[in-house]
Image (cartoon, rainbow, N blue to C red):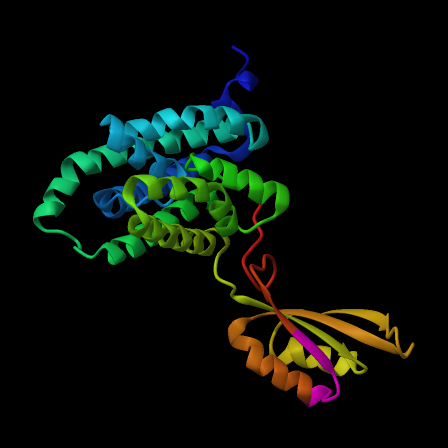
């Protein structure tokens, strides 16, 4: 058999064995967390927070088939849709692992863990179950997406929207899952559906936070006529790199200099103080940066 036609050899050559093992481990861990959030917090109250999981809860009410089995069955056509657009074999194999793990953990939890919890419940408050179901599921989903994986379901459609149009994952989830939540109104009523909408929103926030990370980096853009003085202070006192461009004001036509500096959030107060010390007439814009890779920040490693 040609090894280049074998997905394992393709991944091994592309990623390396150690990285491949790490990816699979995180996908399994993240999916298991996702499934526990779903089975322990959402299923007991029929909280339909969109997705194939939510659709499984609805169909389970009428068929008696377990949510895990339904989740697996509904994902088969979505895996085919995502095969060409989201990484082919890389997508198919890793997403299939996630779908299988989610289905197994969900059904095992429903069969063995929920009966125990019914005797000593985590909470009898539906709102708390909604909150923790969304947060726990989002954390698990975010872990999976950090390594390029997918938990399947409408996550596939959400990733396609995120990839094609650049919408944040939270908005993409809202777009793909709203129809399922609306369907749950007909089955479980508005009260449950509104809890599901809250669960979906919290899931998206937690997923974004884990997937993209907290905004720990601040970007300072400085317009000044004293680039040397400002730049030297930032480099010597703040120990941050500075880039400089010569620019011209469109209205005045005068020459100025633009400095660009990335710093940690904890350094921003000192950064503003140093700029004011060197040039109190400087124009400063400070914005958020999601992540900084390279010298002085997180090492940029070749995957």
Residue at the spot 38% in from the left edge and 35% down from the top edge: 52
Task: State the residue lying farthest toward the top.
Answer: 1
Question: Considering only vertical position in the picture, is 98 above or below 167?
Answer: above
Q: x and y percent of residue 45 in the render?
A: 23, 46
Instruction: Work out whether residue 245 or residue 89 is closer to the camera in this orientation and state it.
Output: 89
Left/right placement of residue 268 relative to residue 260 reads: left
Q: x and y percent of residue 246 in the render?
A: 84, 71
Q: Magenta stretch containing residue 79, yes or no?
A: no
Task: State the residue lying farthest toward the left.
Answer: 119
Region in magenta: 277-285
Residue at the spot 42% in from the left edge and 42% down from the top edge: 144
Q: x and y percent of residue 231 in the render?
A: 72, 77
Residue at the spot 58% in from the left edge and 52% down from the top edge: 300
Residue 19 visible in the shown view:
no
Q: Magenta stretch containing residue 278, yes or no?
A: yes
Question: Considering only vertical position in the picture, is 155 above or below 269?
Answer: above
Left/right placement of residue 99 relative to residue 244 reads: left
Instruction: Work out whether residue 241 or residue 78 is closer to the camera in this orientation and state it.
Output: 78
Task: State the residue lying farthest toward the right.
Answer: 253
Left/right placement of residue 46 relative to residue 149 reads: left
Residue at the spot 16% in from the left edge and 42% down from the top edge: 114
Instruction: Work out whether residue 24 or residue 54 is closer to the camera in this orientation and state it.
Output: 54
Instruction: Work out whether residue 183 or residue 127 is closer to the camera in this orientation and state it.
Output: 183
Q: x and y percent of residue 216 in the render?
A: 51, 66
Q: Quadrant of the C terminus?
A: top right
């Amino acid at each position: 058999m040609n090894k280049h036609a074998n997905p394992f050899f393709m991944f091994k050559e592309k990623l390396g064995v150690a990285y491949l093992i790490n990816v699979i481990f995180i996908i399994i861990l993240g999916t298991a967390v996702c499934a526990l959030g779903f089975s322990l917090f959402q299923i007991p109250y029929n909280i339909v927070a969109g997705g194939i999981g939510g659709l499984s809860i609805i169909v389970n009410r009428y068929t008696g088939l377990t949510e895990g089995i339904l989740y697996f069955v509904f994902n088969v056509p979505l895996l085919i849709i995502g095969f060409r657009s989201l990484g082919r074999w890389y997508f198919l194999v890793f997403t299939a692992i996630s779908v299988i793990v989610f289905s197994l953990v969900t059904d095992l939890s429903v069969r063995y863990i929920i009966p125990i919890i019914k005797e000593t419940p985590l909470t009898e408050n539906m709102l708390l179950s909604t909150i923790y179901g969304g947060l726990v599921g989002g954390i698990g989903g975010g872990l999976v997406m950090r390594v390029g994986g997918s938990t399947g379901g409408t996550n596939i459609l959400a990733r396609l929207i995120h990839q094609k149009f650049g919408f944040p994952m939270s908005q993409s989830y809202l777009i793909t899952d709203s129809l399922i939540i609306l369907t749950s109104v007909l089955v479980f009523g508005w009260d449950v559906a509104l809890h599901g909408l809250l669960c979906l929103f919290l899931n998206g926030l937690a997923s974004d936070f884990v997937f993209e990370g907290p905004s720990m980096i601040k970007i300072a853009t400085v317009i000044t006529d004293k680039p040397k003085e400002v730049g030297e202070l930032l480099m010597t006192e703040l120990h941050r790199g500075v880039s400089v461009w010569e620019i011209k004001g469109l209205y005045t036509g005068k020459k100025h200099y633009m400095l660009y500096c990335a710093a940690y959030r904890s350094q921003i107060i000192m950064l503003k103080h140093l700029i004011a010390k060197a040039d109190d007439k400087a124009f400063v814009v400070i914005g958020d940066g999601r992540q900084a890779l390279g010298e002085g920040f997180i090492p940029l490693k070749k995957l």
